[in-house]
């Protein structure tokens, strides 16, 4: 009787060797991982090592340009901009990762079930996804946050909901393509249950294109949170957050205090760039066929 071959069966240490190979072969992927490591260090250690209290005000030091004492200058309340940009990294990354994790988990489950079973399951899931996609995504996120309140949890929930259809549709397509493949038939003959086949045989092969979507959505989630904060529906002041800081700094650009919006905006841009560049590298790392 034919036996099913696991979709992922790397030798001990094989995944690590393959990851190092991917990083050496693609300098842009390596750069993206280095930048990601810097953001992670800033998120974990930033609040402990910043030179100034990000919430401390000093009227005598208000609107000072960048200097040796205040590397990114100060805002209109005398708060150190560099310290606030660094401390804001943790909150923005937490919102982004939490939202994408929720949307990936929910979308992968719904899409995989719809693609594997078809029929009424597929029809119901597709209609729900079509309903969500009928709204402009940012407008839908605005409506959810406005209805539930502008807390961090609600921002994460709104971002997850608007991202969910991307993963559901992608996983549905990938699973639907593979549900009648030879290795799936072999697994059925070996006595595996439907859920076991879906989880261990089909989904690992559908994961690589979803990793690219995860990378892109991490950047979009940060932009979404910053956009909500920019229009007053995001994180509430005085909490350091890149979108709030850009919104506050925009009022002073005309009067010449360019640093207030430039540095948090640059951090936001660099974070989005990093996550966008991670996509191809993550796809190559998790693709079972690339390790064969």
Image (cartoon, rainbow, N blue to C red):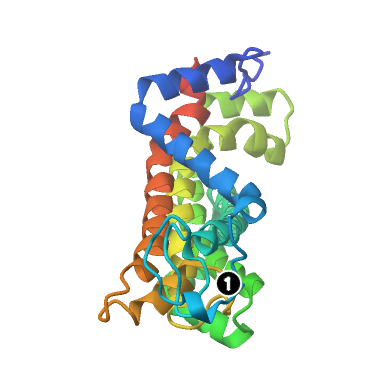
**Picture coordinates of residue 117 (x, y %)?**
59, 49
Image quadrant assignment for residue 100 = bottom right
Of residue 173 and residue 28, the one placed in the foreground of this image is 28
Residue at (25% x, 80% y) in the render: 254
Where does the image place residue 71, in percent across and percent down from the top left?
44, 57
Q: Residue at x 38, y 61 (%)?
A: 66
Circle 1 packing at 10 Å, graded few (<14), some (14-19), many (20+), is: many
Q: Residue at x 42, y 60 (%)?
A: 72
* Residue 27: quadrant of the picture: top left
Nearer to us in this view, 110 or 97: 97
Residue 142: give x, y in percent of width and height: 48, 80
State whether residue 180 is above or below residue 215: above
Instruction: Kindly identify the residue that appears in the image at 58 percent across and 29 percent down.
Output: 184
Which one is nearer the viewer's eye here, 89 or 46?
A: 46
Q: Which residue is mark 1?
A: 155
Determine whether 171 is above or below 130 in the image.
above
Residue 134 visible, this angle: no
Q: Which residue appears farthest toward the bottom when viewing the image?
A: 147
User: Quadrant of the image for the N terminus?
Assistant: top right
Helix, strand or loop under label 1: helix
Q: Give the vertical position of 31 relative to 246 (above or below).
A: above
Mark yes or no: residue 105 visible: yes
Q: Is residue 191 left or right of residue 258?
A: right
Q: Position of residue 186 (x, y in %)?
A: 62, 23
Q: How many marks?
A: 1
Frontmost residue, 194 versus 245: 245
């Amino acid at each position: 009787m034919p036996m099913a071959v696991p979709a992922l069966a790397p030798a001990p240490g094989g995944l690590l060797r393959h990851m190092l190979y991917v990083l050496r072969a693609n300098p842009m992927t390596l750069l993206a991982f280095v930048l990601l490591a810097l953001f992670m260090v800033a998120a974990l250690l930033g609040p402990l090592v910043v030179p100034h209290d990000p919430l401390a005000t000093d009227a005598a030091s208000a609107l000072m340009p960048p200097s040796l004492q205040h590397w990114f200058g100060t805002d209109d309340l005398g708060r150190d901009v560099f310290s606030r940009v660094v401390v804001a990294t943790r909150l923005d990354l937490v919102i982004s990762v939490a939202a994408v994790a929720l949307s990936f988990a929910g979308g992968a489950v719904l899409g995989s079930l719809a693609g594997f079973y078809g029929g009424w399951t597929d029809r119901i899931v597709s209609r729900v996804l079509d309903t969500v996609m009928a709204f402009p995504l940012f407008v839908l996120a605005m409506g959810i946050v406005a209805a539930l309140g502008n807390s961090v949890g609600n921002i994460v929930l709104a971002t997850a909901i608007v991202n969910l259809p991307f993963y559901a549709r992608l996983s549905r397509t990938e699973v639907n393509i593979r549900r009648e493949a030879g290795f799936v038939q072999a697994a059925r003959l070996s006595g595996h249950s439907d859920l076991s086949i879906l989880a261990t045989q089909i989904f690992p092969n559908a994961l690589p294109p979803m990793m690219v979507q995860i990378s892109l959505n991490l950047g979009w989630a940060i932009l979404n949170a910053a956009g909500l904060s920019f229009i007053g529906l995001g994180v509430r002041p005085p909490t350091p957050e890149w979108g709030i800081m850009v919104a506050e700094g925009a009022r002073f650009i005309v009067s010449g205090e360019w640093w207030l919006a430039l540095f948090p905006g640059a951090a936001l841009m660099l974070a989005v760039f990093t996550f966008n560049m991670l996509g191809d590298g993550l796809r190559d790392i998790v693709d079972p066929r690339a390790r064969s």
